[in-house]
Image (spheres, rainbow, N blue to C red):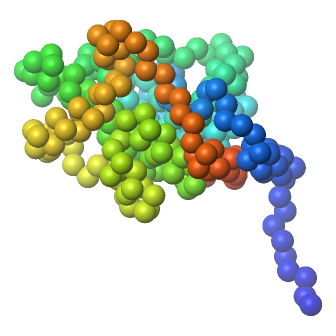
Amino acid sequence: MKNRNRTKVSAATLQKRKEAAARAFTTPSETHGFCFKYFPTRGRKPVSDQRKNLRQLGIDNSRILDIHYPDTNVVGFLIHNDYATELLDLMKQHNLEPNTKFDPHNPQYLRDKKYLDMSHDEQIIQADLIQYNRILRAINYVRQPVKFAVARFFCHTQVITPVILHDVLNRHNVAPKQSSRELSSDRTKAAADQFRIDSPSDKSEKGHDTEMIIDNGQLEDQEAQFSNSGTTHTPIPQ
């Protein structure tokens, strides 16, 4: 039998695979779930350039599920909650601090002039809808099987509907094909209301924290495969 040429796997990749396999036999962490972390940026560089920068800072690109630019001079990273502390520590080693003031639900970040004539309540709905669409694009571009874990998480936290989750699990494209101004008023309000159930902009009014933690065995099984080989991700346009 002829020997087949096998691609050499680096020691670092093998270690990541071992760690991913080991996580399949651990209990869910207290920080179970996913989140966005925001940092300052000088401009909207191509995502490939941002990933090169992250790699040079010692950050594992496979743990950065998606990258997008929600505002001028702001870059957002979608990560697993368990990676948040490590990411912040690595950035801090280079004197880089997160942008904790940025809130994607705050209508002050609506830069398009078409929103100026809207009421404050309408602006809040638009801001929430734009963030909702960003999350749909993020889910759409995250690789499988982590894509399914991310979608399940956002469904459990009532950010997306079970219908959207069903589409993701059936490998359908869920990225919005219309801008918010092209949506009907009823559809816009329905999407915004669904997203704003636990919107950070409503915390003060509700008087309680909306920490996103779930306990789902299937989600954990999918997350156990999280550290497999990394892939290039697509930016999320606003």
Would residue 40 be found to the left or right of residue 228 on screen?
A: left
Q: Which residue is depicted at the point 68% across and 47% down?
A: 224
Q: Which residue is depicted at the point 29% across and 27% down?
A: 196
Q: Which image quarter holds the N terminus?
A: bottom right
Would residue 98 be found to the left or right of residue 134 on screen?
A: right
Tell me if residue 160 can be seen. Answer: yes
Rendering coords of residue 96 (x, y %): 61, 16
Q: Which image quarter holds the C terminus?
A: top left
Return the residue found at the far left. Answer: 117
Q: Quadrant of residue 210?
A: top left
- 93 and 120: which one is in front? 120
- 170 and 96: which one is in front? 170
Rendering coords of residue 104 (x, y %): 35, 24
Would residue 78 be found to the left or right of residue 189 on screen?
A: right
Rendering coords of residue 154 (x, y %): 44, 39
The image shows residue 235, relative to residue 205, as above or below, that is below
Return the residue found at the far bottom. Answer: 1
- 198 and 181: which one is in front? 198
Rendering coords of residue 14 (x, y %): 83, 52
Q: Quadrant of residue 79?
A: top right
- 151 and 39: which one is in front? 151
Q: Which residue is depicted at the point 19% across and 38% down?
A: 190
Would residue 17 be found to the left or right of residue 212 on screen?
A: right
Q: Which residue is depicted at the point 53% across and 34% down?
A: 214
Tell me if residue 56 can be seen. Answer: no
